Amino acid sequence: MSNGLKREWRLTFIQTALLPIVPGSPFSPALVVHSCLTFEVVCAGPIRFMSRFLFSTDALPQVSRAEAVHEFLEKMSEKVGLQRYTDDLNVRFLFGGFAGLHLFVARNSLLTLECNGKGRLSDHISIAFNDSSGARLTRYRGSESVIEPNGASVRLMEYPAARLKTSGNTTILFPAEELFRRIKYKDSAFVPHLHRNAAGLQLLRRYLDIMKQDGAPTSRAEEQLFANHVYDLLAFTLGANADTAEQALRGGLRAARLKAAKDYIAGHLLDPGLSNDAVAAHLNVSDRYVSMLFAAEDTSCKTHIDTQRLSKAYAMLASPLSARVKIIDVAYACGFNDITTFNRRFRARYGMTPSDARRTKGSNDTDLLC
């Protein structure tokens, strides 16, 4: 490599791939070639099927380190914003991967990482272990989770996320479709965090430690066997195939979440932004999971919201206290933004117009209210 193609940043390949790497992975040939033209490359160690390489800021002046980290992470995964808490920025990233699995180990000075969720791995799921000495905070899909040491955060990579004041993590990234082929309830993949004592989590961590060490697979057969074990363990860890998870989903956990969803709706009926997505964000689950909760009662979240709003509107129209309130104002007060939609849905539910309901003076309250 000519000096004209080198920059001052240093990328050390610990191991290189024996066979061509699958296009589209973060280790695709196009990216590796670009890296060779951008960074100084030093090859070392025996050739294996698993590709691992190290990025370090150790040899860089402080003024260049943030730019180097930004560019490297964007090439490997996604755009990431950095907030530092010390004058010195020190970062070491270990990347590795095979058979669709990607390993990322970070050791760094205290940082907050703001990930934008629109990178080359947006169709992947990540499980990120907290390797810091203390708990860290994670922001994801409108909620915050506290991740204790050795616990893990779970993220669908298409969504933005933030890790606050972290100094280290070990992360496995894998195609979402590989997990969904193995689980019955896909929405269990979107729980925001896993407690360190969650079933299978520490066994998964030991597999990741093997990936970091020299015990990684050395043949395609070993590679695929190892990967299958990891994928099955991922499915087990997320709980979607376990009998206890299924029972919880159909029993107390589902009932508790459905009640929480209904309570949230009842408290936000006047919010025009109330929706399936808003309820999902409040519960820290996916919108599909919310749909499943209401489907068990042969309804939908949207229908439930409309029903509660219409019930409130009927009660107002039938009450003497609201006799002077215009019907359009009743509609707006109950969360409807369009009087035509309100009139149509009211008539469909009660078999009468809002004006008819006002004239009944509540005589049929018992029959008509939910």
Image (cartoon, rainbow, N blue to C red):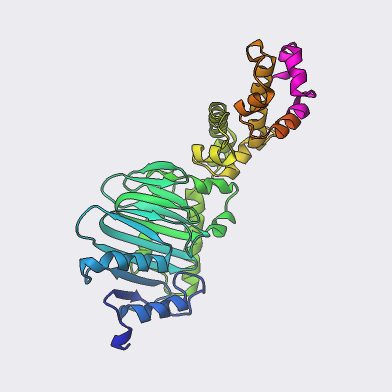
Above or below, comparing residue 94 to residue 137 in the picture? below
229 displayed left or right of 131: right
Q: Does the magenta stretch include residue 343?
A: no
Indicate the position of residue 241 as horizontal and vertical percent values: 55, 47
- Identify the residue shown where x is 27% and y is 59%: 108
Question: Which is more toward the observer, 244 or 105?
Answer: 105
Indicate the position of residue 252 as horizontal and vertical percent values: 55, 31
Visible in this render: residue 70? yes
Indicate the position of residue 288 as horizontal and vertical percent values: 60, 44
Question: Which is more toward the observer, 128 or 290?
Answer: 290
Q: What are the residue bounds of the magenta stretch?
A: 346-369
Which quadrant, please, contains the N terminus?
Answer: bottom left
Q: Is residue 351 magenta?
A: yes
Indicate the position of residue 102 as horizontal and vertical percent values: 43, 64
- Identify the residue shown where x is 38% and y is 54%: 114
Question: Which is more toward the observer, 110 or 180?
Answer: 110
Question: Which is more toward the observer, 233 or 276?
Answer: 276
- How many marks the image carries: the answer is 0
Above or below, comparing residue 253 to residue 141 in the picture? above
Question: Dividing the picture into quarters, in which one does residue 103 lie?
Answer: bottom left
Above or below, comparing residue 202 to residue 274 in the picture? below
39 displayed left or right of 243: left
Visible in this render: residue 370? no
